[in-house]
Image (spheres, rainbow, N blue to C red):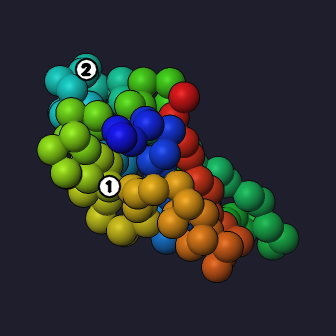
Amino acid sequence: MSEKKHEYGLLIDYEYCTGCHTCEIACSQEYQWPAGMAGIKVIEVVQKLPNDKAYLTYLPFPTELCMLCARRTKKGLEPTCVQHCMAACMKYGHIEELAKEMGKKARMVLWVPR
């Protein structure tokens, strides 16, 4: 019995994303897309704090172009964003296993493509 596409997903730990954009660049290069076009985007959120200070948060977010690198994962490889993530804050796998890990921390999201 073959696995369904939606049985796999991407777990993203926002606590450790440094905003390096390597996932975006790797995705663009994997598909030979022009700069700015990717299956994942890193969103920068600036929160203003008291005393004119700021807190930066980076949120890697899959776009409608993300296919979880179907060509790569069929070969047993990780999606290119996961392979190249310098902060190791992304993980690819079965959604049931990823969901178990998600319960360990508050700043994680599980993304499953349609």
Query: N-terminal of the two: label 1 or label 2?
Result: 2
Q: Position of residue 86 (x, y in %)?
A: 30, 65
Amino acid type shown at disc 2: Pro
Q: Which residue is mark 2?
A: 34
Amino acid type shown at disc 1: Val
- Of residues 65 and 33, the one nearer the viewer is 65
Q: Position of residue 93 (x, y in %)?
A: 40, 57
Local secondary structure at mark 2 = loop
> The C terminus appears in which quarter of the rendering?
top right
Residue at image point 29% right, 34% down: 70
Relative vertical location of residue 70 with respect to residue 9 in this rendering, above or below? above
Viewed as shown, does residue 62 lie left or right of 27?
right
Viewed as shown, does residue 101 lie left or right of 52?
left
Camera-near label (1 vs 2) is 1
- Of residues 8 and 78, the one nearer the viewer is 8
**How many angstroms separate mark 1 from mark 2 (CA)?**
20 Å
Residue at image point 28% right, 26% down: 35
Viewed as shown, does residue 104 lie left or right of 98?
right
Q: Residue furthest right?
A: 50
Q: Residue furthest top?
A: 34
**Circle number at residue 82:** 1
Residue at image point 21% right, 33% down: 71
